[in-house]
Each structure stands twice: as structure tokens, then as C-alpha cells.
Image: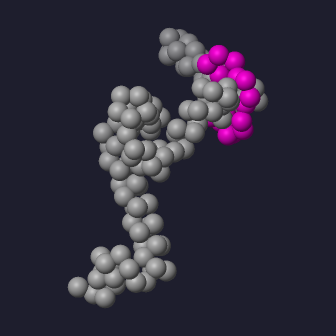
């Protein structure tokens, strides 16, 4: 066993080394936990919702730091969406305050999206007409 490992196990000694090492180890563990949960179910928002309901409702657990470190972004976005009535545009990422019901894009991106959808629909109609006439 190396001197560093002995000092780490004793809990005393090289404070400047121990703190960054423990922090990086914890961050790695949170990343692994996130990856394992995403392998089970690929929707991070759904996992975050289930974990929040369980950790804050069913079982009032003291282990909430793992939730925040692993799925903090999703939890914050969910709070913004449900409490503050804000969304991030799925096209450009701009924050939209007080969106309409089921709105997921800003008006500018929604217009671009509609134009592309119309273009694709019209292309399919033309293709079907060409196939019928040939």
C-alpha cells in the first residue's frame, strides 16, 4: 500500500491532495450512477421525476445529493417549467416566458419548423402524384 493510500485511509495528512481526489471520485460515481440509470430508461427527465417523487414523497431520504449531482439539470428544468412557467426553445435554446399550452419552441423557430414540415408534406404529395402518373 502506498503512502498516499495510507494517508487517505487514516483521514489525516495531506489535505490538499485528499480533497480534490475525493471530489473527483464522487463526481465519477455520480456520472456512473447517471449512466447506469440511463441504460435502464433513456429519458433523463422521466428518471429525474421518478426520483424526485420517491426521494421527496415516498421515502424522505437524506441521500438527495446524489439526485442533484446526477440529474440536477433535469430537476432545475422541471422546476422552471412547472413553477416559473418557463421553457427553453428546443430549436435555439432561448428562454420563453409564459409559453402557450404545449409550446416547445419560440415563435421564430416554430415558423421555421412549420415551413420545413410544409415543405416535406408537399414533397411527399408531389412524389405520390408522380408515382401515380408514371
State the image quarter where residue 107 is shown. top right
Q: Residue at x 67, y 40 (%)?
A: 93
Q: Quadrant of residue 53?
A: top left
Q: Residue at x 49, y 80 (%)?
A: 16
- Rendered view: 70 above or below 19: above
Furthest toward the bottom, the residue is 3
Q: Is residue 125 above or below residue 73?
A: above
* 121 within the magenta span: no
Q: Quadrant of residue 83?
A: top right
Q: Magenta region, mostly helix, strand or loop?
A: loop
Q: Is residue 9 left or right of residue 107?
A: left
Question: In the shown orientation, is residue 102 left or right of residue 41?
Answer: right
Q: Is residue 9 left or right of residue 91?
A: left
Q: Is residue 96 highlighted in magenta?
A: yes
* Residue shown at the point (52%, 39%) measured from the top left: 74
The location of residue 13, given as percent across then percent down, is: 40, 84
Spot occupied by residue 50 in the image (x, y as percentages of width and height): 40, 31
**Part of the protein shown in magenta:** 89-104
Q: Can the viewer see residue 93 in this picture?
A: yes
- Estimate the x, y position of residue 64 in percent, counting from the top left: 43, 44
Amino acid at each position: 500500500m502506498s503512502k498516499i493510500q495510507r494517508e487517505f485511509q487514516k483521514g489525516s495528512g495531506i489535505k490538499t491532495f485528499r480533497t480534490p481526489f475525493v471530489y473527483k471520485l464522487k463526481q465519477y460515481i455520480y456520472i456512473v450512477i447517471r449512466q447506469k440509470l440511463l441504460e435502464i430508461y433513456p429519458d433523463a427527465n422521466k428518471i429525474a421525476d421518478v426520483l424526485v417523487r420517491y426521494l421527496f414523497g415516498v421515502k424522505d431520504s437524506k441521500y438527495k445529493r446524489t439526485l442533484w449531482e446526477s440529474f440536477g439539470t433535469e430537476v432545475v428544468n422541471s422546476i422552471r417549467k412547472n413553477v416559473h412557467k418557463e421553457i427553453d426553445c428546443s430549436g435555439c435554446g432561448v428562454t420563453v416566458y409564459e409559453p402557450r399550452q404545449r409550446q416547445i419552441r419560440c415563435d421564430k423557430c416554430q415558423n421555421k419548423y412549420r415551413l420545413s414540415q410544409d415543405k416535406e408534406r408537399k414533397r411527399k404529395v408531389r412524389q405520390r402524384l408522380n408515382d401515380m402518373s408514371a
